[in-house]
Amino acid sequence: MAPFDLRRIARAISAVENGGPDAEQVIRDAYRLARHVPVVGITGPPGVGKSTLLDGLAVHWAERGQTVAVLAIDPSSPHTGGAVLGDRIRMDRAASHPNVFVRSLASRGEMGGLASAAHDVVMVLGALGFDRIVLETVGAGQADVSVASLADVVILVAMPGMGDQVQAAKAGILEIADLYVVNKSDRADALSTIAHVRANVDLIYPGLPGRNVPHRAKATEHANPGLRRRHGSAADAEGYWRPPVLSTCALQGSGVSEVAAAADDFLAWLRETGRYRDRLHDRVRSQILGATRDRLLELCVSAAKARDFNFDELIAAVADGTLGACEASERLIAQLVPSR
C-alpha cells in the first residue's frame, strides 16, 4: 500500500483515540473487513532497548517487501493526556523507511503496558492494508502483560545487569513470552544472563528451542492451562513450542534477523497447529470484555448524573473510612441497575 496516505491513517487513528461518533464509524468499517494481520508485541522493562530492537525488526520486514505499522505505547502526560516519550527518536531508520508507518499512542492511564485504544487501532491498521503490525508496550516490567491479549507473537526483551538478573524470572511476565531476547549482548555479563533466562525456560519446557515433536518427558507437562493453550504440551500430537532465548546487540544490528526469523517461525507454527485462530478468538474476547467494561462504566456515570447522584460525597465517604470501595461501587452500579 506504499506510499501511505498519511493523512487518512492519522485521521483514522486520532478518531479512534478520541472516541465519539466518528470513531464508531471508523471502527465499525474496520471490523466489517475482518482483516486480521500478524501482530508482534515487544515488551520488557524500561531501558532494555525495546525501541532499538523494534526499529531493526520493522526495517527487516519492510526491506522484504512488507508494509509495517509501528505502534509505540507511551506514558501519558498527566496534564494533556498525550504521549510523553515520542519513541520515534529511537526509530530513525523505521520512521524514514517508505514501507513503515510509525505512530505513538498515549497509554492514558491504562494498566498493563497498552493503550485503551490499542485493540481498535490494530484492527483499523489491518483494514488500511498493512501486512504486519509491531507494537511496543510502555515498559512496566513485571505487570506489563496485557500485550499477550493483543499480540500473536510476544517478544520479551531483557538485558544484562538488571539487579535480580532479569525481570523475566517473575511469574507473570515469564509466561506471556513466545520469544526471549537478551539485548546489549556485548556487555561482559551477557552470557550469565542468557544462561539464567534459559534455566527459567527449562523449568517449564522440555526439548529444543522452537518447534518440538511430542516429548516423552511427562514430568514437564504444563500445569498452567494458559501456557498449554499458548504453546502446546509435550503430550500434544501436533507437538509444542519452546520459546527460544536469543541474544542481540540491536544498536549494532546483531541478531535482529534471527529474532525476525524466530517470530515468523512461531507464526507459521500457530497457523499449522490451528492455534492462530485460538489467539484470534482470545484477542476478540478481550476486546469485547474491555469494550463492555468501558461502556458499563460510562452508563453508570451517566445514570448517576441523571439522578443527581452525589459522586463527591461517595468519594469522601470512602476516603474517610465510613464506606468501603466495594460498597461504593455497588451504590454506583445501583444507579444503572436499581434492582440490585
Image: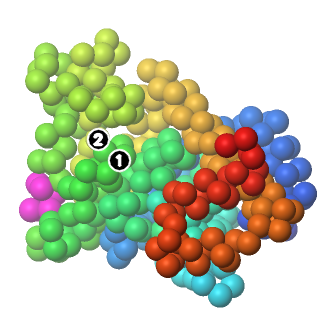
Question: Is 12 part of what is drawn in magenta?
Answer: no
Label 1 neighbour load within 10 Å: few <14, some 14-19, many 20+: many
Q: Is residue 46 above or below residue 334?
A: below
* Residue stretch in magenta: 191-196
Q: Is residue 127 left or right of residue 88?
A: right
Mark 1, residue position: 177
Q: Looking at the rendering, in which quadrant would you find the C terminus?
A: top right
Kind of residue at badge 2: Pro
Q: Is residue 276 left or right of residue 197?
A: right
Q: Is residue 37 above or below residue 79?
A: above
The answer to whether one can see residue 251 in this image is no
Residue occupying image coordinates x 28% and y 33%: 224
Residue occupying image coordinates x 42% and y 54%: 145
Mark 2, residue position: 243
Q: Where in the figure is residue 77, as x and y percent of width and height?
A: 60, 83
Kind of residue at badge 1: Ala
Q: CA distance from mark 1 to mark 2?
A: 7 Å
Q: Where in the figure is residue 197, as x and y percent of width and height?
A: 18, 53
